Image (cartoon, rainbow, N blue to C red):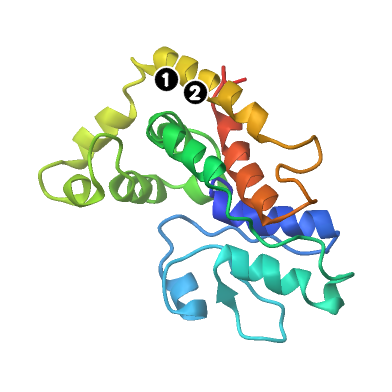
Amino acid sequence: YDHCPFCVRARLALGLKGVRHDVRFMANDDIPLPTSMVGKKIAPIFEDGINDPYAESLDIVRNVDGDERYGPTGMFKEMSDRTDLKAWQKTVQQPLRLLQRPRYVKTYLPEFVTKSSKDAFVKNHQLPPYEKADWKSDQFTMDQRWAMYNDQSNDAELIAEVNEKLKALEPLIHSEDFCTEGGLSLDDIDLWSRLRSLTIVDGLV
């Protein structure tokens, strides 16, 4: 999926390593294809024609980075135990869900071309303050879920909040080249992929 930060992890790593690859997007409501490949609906999925297809983004990154067929190995250091970055991510989780999720399904992204794929995302991805179990229950109709997705009345306030959070993130980043002291690492793969998703929100700096 184009919007998915976990999918972006794999694409970012392959790009940084200069590995030629094909990206094939699945519709968000396509369950049979990923299930036939790895046994469940999940993305990203890596298939090299040699090994069985497999999922889990960081497994893909680690395996490609450790395989000489894809160039020099060891480009990315292992993920650190930094709690400050994880804590920052939690501070922006709720406002970003409110800003990003409605925009994903209103933008021309390959996984959301059809109405059914958009509906599937809206039904499966709750908006705060609702928990997933309540959101997916029968207490909401699809029209009610879509009405909440279409409500942008608090966007200006949410954008201002996230912009302040981004200022708080800046001193946590070690340098222009990597976020954690010591060199390029899985910290960068994870953080950059999450930050890339912010670019769908006009007004975030």
- Asked whether the residues under the numbered discs 1 and 2 touch, taking CB atoms below 8 Å apart as contact, a structural biologist would say yes
Asked if residue 1 shows in the view, the reply is: no
Q: What amino acid type is highlighted by mark number 2?
A: Val
Looking at the picture, how far across and down is residue 154, in whole percent? Answer: 35, 16
Q: Residue furthest right?
A: 72
Position of the C terminus by quadrant: top right
Classify mark 1: helix, strand or loop. Answer: helix
Q: Quadrant of residue 29?
A: bottom left
Classify mark 2: helix, strand or loop. Answer: helix
Viewed as shown, does residue 73 lie left or right of 87?
A: right
Looking at the picture, how far across and down is residue 45, in whole percent? Answer: 58, 69
Say which of 87 and 72 sits in front: 87
- Residue appearing at x 54%, y 68% in the figure: 56
Question: How many tags in the picture?
Answer: 2
- Residue appearing at x 60%, y 37% in the figure: 195
Is residue 74 shown above or below 109? Answer: below
Q: Quadrant of residue 179?
A: top right
Q: Which residue is mark 2?
A: 162
Q: Quadrant of residue 128?
A: top left
Q: Which residue is mark 1?
A: 158
Viewed as shown, does residue 88 lie left or right of 135?
A: right
Q: Badge 2: few (under 14), some or many (20 or more) residues near its Cα, within 10 Å?
A: many
Is residue 177 shown above or below 35? Answer: above
Q: CA distance from mark 1 to mark 2?
A: 6 Å
Looking at the picture, how far across and down is residue 192, in whole percent? Answer: 66, 43
Looking at the picture, how far across and down is residue 61, in whole percent? Answer: 68, 65
- Residue appearing at x 56%, y 55% in the figure: 6
Is residue 107 shown above or below 162? Answer: below
